[in-house]
């Protein structure tokens, strides 16, 4: 009996660790990822201003597992009908039960010039490239403009880091930072009070916010936009253009993000969780693509895979076991904005030092949960220094 987890992001790592404890001894467990390290993705924006944080947010995969075999390879394709996985090494893996945890890629929506001229933010290398370009702009006496496309949490955090970096470099008075969002508010998927507090934090840092504004085209020095309500067009100078405006499924799934429902099954033998899938939970609610959703989905996914494995090993006696539904409940939301933060816990929204401490505790708590305690300590130090 072979169980294969594809991808070592939040969903894949958390699921694999839970399966190590939940599966019977006779089941083999494998996790596949092209990277040697697990990345704490929600902290990668910090690298733009604090490259030293990289060590705290990258954890060697081999250190995270006691039982699972780790295969370093890129997944080329997945045949969920045949339970087969093609790897870039030319090899093929087969599974009895599999979990697609491959994350997502940046979606450019075929907008002319955007993929060619924008900087995405999916990796440490991406953050380092943004930092290098920003420092080039900030070094000198000439005015310059930065444009960030997409005002979800990632775009908000990038804009905040760039504003803080400009201040540290003494360039705030000549650097304009503009945040663009196609919908009618920043952090559009979140509660109104949270949105308002985030907008205030951005405005306090002189970040110009343009909502209901869609990017239509980009060149090496400009970003063209259209206002969704009026149809009015505009062109923004952009010495640096960062794009966080959407997600698409992984290449191994031809860019698709399939829908999975309460039991997280794509078919009888394959599960999908994390950003790889569009998840609808047990209450019929669409689950946001986020680290907290990926981590929380791992628990019912592990329970369900373990139930099915035990049923298979018992010779499929009786009916298929009743599977545990995924119900997404989260206590709140948090986002960093440069050297500040906004947190919502229940109905209450907090900012300032309290929110900053909460932000530090979230990343550290996650690292501690995967037994990377030293990394957790390092991350707290880096976060509180920011």
Image (cartoon, grey):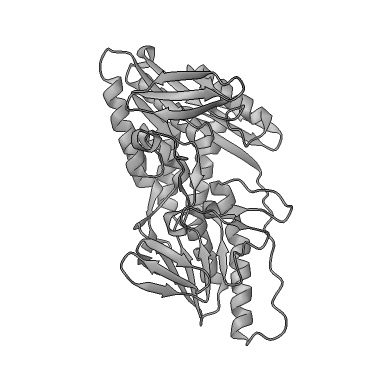
Instruction: Tell me: residue 106, above or below residue 13.
Output: above
Can you see residue 11?
yes
Q: Position of residue 355 (x, y in %)?
A: 57, 32
Residue drawn 50% across the image and 74% down it? 82
Please tell me in which quadrant of the rendered image residue 163 appears: top left
User: Is residue 1 left or right of 299 when viewed as pictured?
Assistant: left
Is 194 drawn above or below residue 145 in the view shown? below
241 up-or-down from 175: above or below = below
Identify which residue, 189 or 380, lies in the foreground. Answer: 189
Q: Position of residue 137 (x, y in %)?
A: 29, 22
| Residue 307 % position (x, y) | 63, 74
* Spot occupied by residue 67 in the image (x, y as percentages of width and height): 44, 72
Q: Nearer the viewer, residue 60 or 4?
A: 4
Q: Nearer the viewer, residue 130 or 63?
A: 130
Q: Is residue 3 above or below residue 362?
A: below
Foreground residue among 4 and 53: 4
Q: Residue at x 46, y 22 (%)?
A: 178
Q: How many marks?
A: 0
Quadrant (top left/top right/bottom left/bottom right) for the C terminus: top left
- Residue 338 at least partly seen: no
At 57% across and 28% down in the image, what residue appears? 186
């Amino acid at each position: 009996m072979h169980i294969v987890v594809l991808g070592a992001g939040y969903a894949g790592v958390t699921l694999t660790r839970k399966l190590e404890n939940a599966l019977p001894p006779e089941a083999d467990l494998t996790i596949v990822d092209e990277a040697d390290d697990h990345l704490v993705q929600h902290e990668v924006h910090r690298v733009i201003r604090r490259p030293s944080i990289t060590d705290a947010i990258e954890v060697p995969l081999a250190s995270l597992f006691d039982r699972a075999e780790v295969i370093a390879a890129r997944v080329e394709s997945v045949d969920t009908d045949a339970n087969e996985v093609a790897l870039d090494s030319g090899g093929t893996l087969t599974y009895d039960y599999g979990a697609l945890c491959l994350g997502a890629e940046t979606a450019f929506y075929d907008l002319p010039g955007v993929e060619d001229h924008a900087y995405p933010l999916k990796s440490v290398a991406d953050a380092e490239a943004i930092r290098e370009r920003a420092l080039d702009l900030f070094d000198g006496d000439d005015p310059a403009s930065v444009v960030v496309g997409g005002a979800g949490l990632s775009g908000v955090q990038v804009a905040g880091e760039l504003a803080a970096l400009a201040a540290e470099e003494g360039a705030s008075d000549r650097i304009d930072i503009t945040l663009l969002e196609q919908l009618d508010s920043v952090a559009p998927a979140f509660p109104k009070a949270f949105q308002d507090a985030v907008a205030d934090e951005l405005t306090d840092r002189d970040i110009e916010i343009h909502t209901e504004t869609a990017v239509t085209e980009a060149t090496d020095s400009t970003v063209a936009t259209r206002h969704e309500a009026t149809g009015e067009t505009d062109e923004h100078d952009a010495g640096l253009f960062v794009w966080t405006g959407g997600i698409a499924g992984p290449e191994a799934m031809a860019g698709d993000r399939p829908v999975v429902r309460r039991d997280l099954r794509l078919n009888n033998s394959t599960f999908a969780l994390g950003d790889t899938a569009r998840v609808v939970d047990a209450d019929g609610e669409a689950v946001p693509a986020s680290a907290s959703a990926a981590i929380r989905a791992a628990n019912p996914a592990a329970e369900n895979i373990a139930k099915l494995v035990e049923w298979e090993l018992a010779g499929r006696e009786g009916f298929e076991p009743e599977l545990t539904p995924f119900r997404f409940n989260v206590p709140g939301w948090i986002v960093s904005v440069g050297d500040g933060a906004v947190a919502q816990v229940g109905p209450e929204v907090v900012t300032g030092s309290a929110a900053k401490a909460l932000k530090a505790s979230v990343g550290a708590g996650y690292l501690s949960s995967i037994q990377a305690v030293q990394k957790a300590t390092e991350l707290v130090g880096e976060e509180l220094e920011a």
